[in-house]
Amino acid sequence: MSTETIIQMQHVNKEYQMGDVTVRALRDLNLDIAAGELIVLLGPSGSGKTTTLNVIGGLDRPTAGHILVAGDDITGYNSKKLTQYRRQKMGFVFQFFNLIPTLTASENVEFALALVEKDGKRLQDKARDLLQMVGLNDRGDHFPSQLSGGEQQRVAIARALANQPPVILCDEPTGNLDVETGQRVLQVMRDLNHQRNTTVVLVTHNSVIARMADRVVRLHNGSIADISENVHPAPVSELSW
Ligand SMILES: Nc1ncnc2c1ncn2[C@@H]1O[C@H](COP(=O)(O)OP(=O)(O)OP(=O)(O)O)[C@@H](O)[C@H]1O
Ligand SMILES: [Mg+2]
């Protein structure tokens, strides 16, 4: 694992105003994430996991504090720069795959690629390579409704990888998958991490899944309760939940 820091969260706070009530979703979060690290954010419902991903990914802004990505403070970005940042630096994998139902698996991946790749032939080649990477080379022509849940999630991963982002953010990527298909999805994340040195930030409420991480950050009530290192991260094949 490289020791270069890619993400630095410094005194990050996020508050939501709900009428008279202030919800403190993140409370003074301080966290450094190393390039090439696979880190799991673990915590119960409402502990701030998704909020943390959203502020790292530039989908939402912290109320206070700073987030440095490769040394650049993204909290100072205007919305145009933030959009560019999301496209170039971040891949998102959400619990509910968010595939476009009227496009095939290939077209869903091409759709994301089209933001950067204008040449039609290269677009198709790249989409095929990406689907191959997640083990779906023979499913390119299937529409989302013709794919299993695990296959849909892997298309979502292929799409998130389209622009070769240095960081992938996954929110409960196995949330509604059975163990076997969930393992396949996690294996793709681990392979990517090993083969391309992609930094992976994976959110889960499941402590078994956390065993695959290089490091586990436990969130509680919007604060970091504990950070622990797995000296020997568990192989995905040994996880059962
Ligand atoms: N848009 C919002 N407006 C108001 N409060 C919000 C908003 N988004 C999140 N919250 C609150 O912030 C807190 C943290 O929410 P968050 O979604 O980060 O939790 P989580 O750890 O991802 O939970 P889960 O495991 O249920 O997905 C919760 O108390 C939630 O109710
Ligand atoms: Mg959440």
Image (spheres, rainbow, N blue to C red):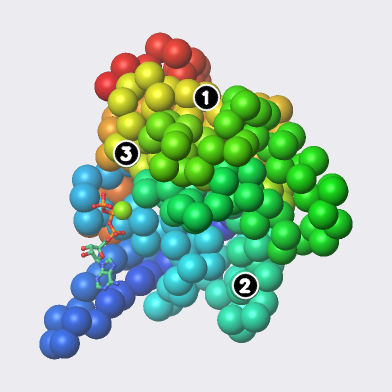
Q: CA distance from mark 2 to mark 1?
A: 29 Å
Q: Please name whichever residue, 168 or 68, is drawn nearer the observer in this view of the structure.
A: 168
Residue occupied by mark 3:
175
Q: Position of residue 93 (x, y in %)?
A: 49, 48
Q: CA distance from mark 3 to mark 2?
A: 27 Å
Residue occupied by mark 2:
83
Q: Position of residue 16 (x, y in %)?
A: 28, 77
Name the side, left or right, on which 81 lies relative to 118: left
- Circle 1 sits in a helix, a strand or a loop, which is it? helix
Q: What amino acid is labelled 1 in the image?
A: Gln
Q: Position of residue 123 (x, y in %)?
A: 78, 50
Residue at left offset 45%, top offset 13%: 237
Q: Do the numbered discs 1 and 3 sit on residues whose CB atoms are within 8 Å?
A: no
Q: Is mark 2 within 8 Å of ligand 1?
A: no
Locate the N terminus by quadrant: top right
Q: Please name whichever residue, 7 or 134, is drawn nearer the observer in this view of the structure.
A: 134
**Crowd class of label 2 (few under 14; some 14 to 19; many from 20; radius 10 Å):** some
Q: What amino acid is labelled 3 in the image?
A: Gly
Q: What amino acid is labelled 2 in the image?
A: Thr
**Crowd class of label 1 (few under 14; some 14 to 19; many from 20; radius 10 Å):** some
Name the side, left or right, on which 205 lies relative to 165: left
- Quick one: label 3 or label 2, which is nearer the N terminus? 2
Residue occupied by mark 1:
187
